[in-house]
Image (cartoon, rainbow, N blue to C red):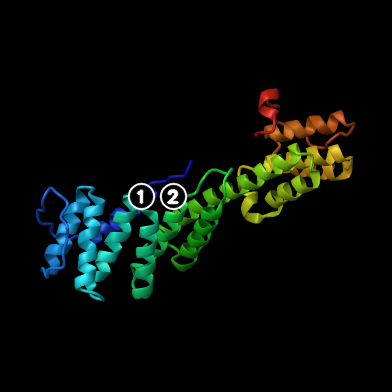
Amino acid sequence: MPISLRSSSVLALSVVAALTVAACNGGSQRPRLAYEERPVELLYNTGYERLQRNRWADAVDYFQEVERQHPYSEWSRRAILMQIYAYYRNGSYEESIAAADRFIQLFPGSPSAAYAFYMRATCHFEQIVDVGRDQGRAELALAGLRDVARRYPGTPYATDAVVKIDLVNDQLAGKEMAIGRYYQRARQPLAAIGRYQAVVENEAFQRTSHTPEALYRLVEVYLALGLKDEATRNGAVLGFNYPGSPWYAEAYALLTEDGQRPDTEPTGRRESWLQRIIPG
């Protein structure tokens, strides 16, 4: 299931409001636009009227016509921004990305380039799929969001990008955990260790919700391999950082059953046996 956060819509609406021109009345049916010179204000305002009525595809037609008849103008600049937003609201993410790329190429120095960069990253973000599938979109979203945070610090775009970066990192860490569990079930402990260590050692992943489980799984795998020192070390890290986590309560029980006595007493409770089953 794709991750979907509509906070980006709020930011997009602020841009739409900033570009508003008094809208004129349009027809109720979607027109078939043929090339015909019309006042640019009429084209733009009709597109905006369609936008206000959530007729995203109709709006795109008019804004494209503005761009076609008045290229490289201020109206064209505004029309491309509107296309980015209309495509996004229509769920046409690839088209929105293409429009954002076009804006960045044509108007790299514009203050509105921040919006184009942000929406390009957001369109990738909206297409992230569950951890059981390829995470190419997550990687693209992460790169784009980091770019926004780096280029435009202190802006609402950067603020929202930072929030989304944490969500994407959690997603990517979850993918590592899913693969690690697969290897553990398949009795490939070394491969599983590599995936769990990737979560524990990656600074971006360390802040995610998956780190306590990754440390617990390392305790579990190392004990199964007879590597008690490694198991103890990871258990100590888990206990120091997450003493109240159910994962530490589980690790503490495993180490104690193995004849060891961890220094830190758990403050959390063990989960039921159903919850302790490795997710599939």
Q: Residues within 10 Å of mark 1 (few under 14, many from 20)?
A: some
> For the point 57% across and 51% down, which residue is it?
169
> For the point 75% across and 40% down, which residue is it?
184
**Label 2 or label 1, whichever comes before in sequence order:** 1
Q: Is residue 220 left or right of residue 41?
A: right
Residue 92: image location, x then y, percent: 35, 53
Residue 224: image location, x then y, percent: 85, 37
Residue 249: image location, x then y, percent: 73, 31
> For the point 55% across and 57% down, which residue is it?
139
Quarter of the view holding residue 15 = bottom left
Up-down relation of residue 121 to residue 214 (above or below): below
Please state which amino acid type lies under the numbered disc 2.
Glu
Q: Which residue is mark 1?
A: 91
Up-down relation of residue 46 to residue 188 (above or below): below
Q: Is residue 215 left or right of residue 260?
A: left
Quarter of the view holding residue 250 = top right
Quarter of the view holding residue 263 = top right
- Total of numbered circles in the picture? 2
> For the point 12% across and 70% down, which residue is it?
37
- Label of residue 126 in the image: 2
Please state which amino acid type lies under the numbered disc 1.
Gly
Q: Residues within 10 Å of mark 2 (few under 14, many from 20)?
A: many
- Secondary element under disc 2, as helix, strand or loop, is helix
Whether residue 272 is visible, yes or no, is: no
Front residue of 93/273: it is 93
Q: Is residue 184 left or right of residue 129?
A: right
- Secondary element under disc 1, as helix, strand or loop, is loop
The residue mark sitting in front, 2 or 1, is 1
Q: Marks 2/1: CA distance?
A: 9 Å
Quadrant holding the C terminus = top right
